Image: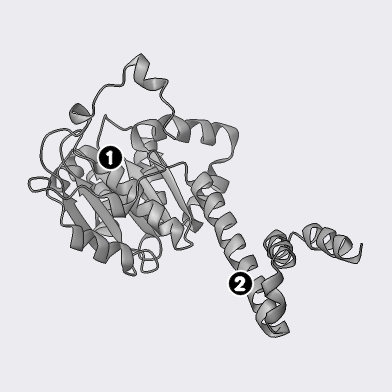
Amino acid sequence: MMMHTTLAQLRSLKLDGLAAGLEEQLAQPGMAALSFEERVALLIDREVHARNDRKLVRLLKNAHLKYGQAAIEDIDARAGRGIDRREVMSLALGEWVSAGHSVLVTGPTGAGKSWLACALAQYACRRGYSAIYQRVPRLQEELRIRHGSGAFGKWLLQLAKTDVLVLDDWGMGAIDGMTRSDLLEIIDDRAGTKATIITSQLPVEHWHAWIGDATIADAILDRIMQRNHRFTLTGDSLRAQRPKTTKKEKNIDPS
């Protein structure tokens, strides 16, 4: 009865990992051979891992990544794709997030730009950093809504605190004056302190013309280019290589 009370109290304190570890120890007779200190150490280790797992789930959920399962370990680095696996891994394992660096990924449609951006953001989440994914073509309308509702300032503050911001499909479609100014605010808040990943079909040298206003373009690009890493992807579209799933195949149980 006492142990049931203890387990209930642990869960009421949200120490679910510790409670699960204690239940496992009670079910394993061999645990009696361990010292008190060893059993406590195992319980604490179980709670730490449980908290880390919950944090990762929360970070990935809040990130809203387009490709939530993208992982740098699965990078397609075949010849002709323009990706050096060692360069990507070196970046992912480095301090680009804490140092507030920019990652610029360019290439033709279907080359895997968004996937690579999401893989880098996903790995940042695995290291405990926060991330948010935004498609620039949709951002313009979202900014209008936030301005109209009075929520823009609060949202801008949220972005400024986010460790990794993914701006996907940069340079796709024209932008108006308000969006230019808002992009400058977003980029300025992050310059040198928070990491930003930008993907675009446009080569970097065409970004100034896309932004349109020379003064704002100079300011945005100056901040993006301070400390950046570039990946230029090449090759045929990966989307065209994916086999089409038939109705019969959809009903197959993967297990």
Q: Up-down: is 47 above or below 66?
A: below
In-front residue for pair 30/195: 30
Question: Hey, which quadrant is residue 48 in on the image?
Answer: bottom right
Residue 238: x and y in percent read 19, 34
Mark 2: secondary structure: helix
**Nearest the eye: 190 or 149:** 190
Give the residue displayed 73% in from the left and 66% down from the top.
Answer: 22
Q: Residue 225 at x, y = what percent?
A: 23, 59
Q: Which mark is residue 170?
A: 1
Of all residues, the one furthest to the top in this rendering is 247
Q: Secondary structure at mark 1?
A: loop
* Image point (52%, 55%), residue name: 56
Q: Earlier in the sequence, mark 1 or mark 2?
A: 2
Discs 1/2, front: 2
Residue 30 screen position, x and y as percent: 67, 73
Q: Is residue 73 left or right of residue 84?
A: right
Identity, as a three-letter code, of the amino acid under mark 1: Trp
Instruction: Compute the Cα span from label 1 to label 2.
Output: 43 Å
Which residue in the protein does label 2 denote? 45
Q: Is residue 49 left or right of residue 215?
A: right
User: Can residue 212 be seen at all in this image of the molecule?
Assistant: no
Quadrant where the image shows the C terminus: top left
Q: Left or right: where does residue 103 sit relative to residue 53?
A: left
Q: Is residue 107 visible?
A: yes
Q: Quadrant of the N terminus?
A: bottom right
- Residue sitting at x 26%, y 21%: 244
Q: Mark 2 packing: few (<14 Cα in 10 Å), some, or many (20+)?
A: some
List the single residue furthest toward the front: 29
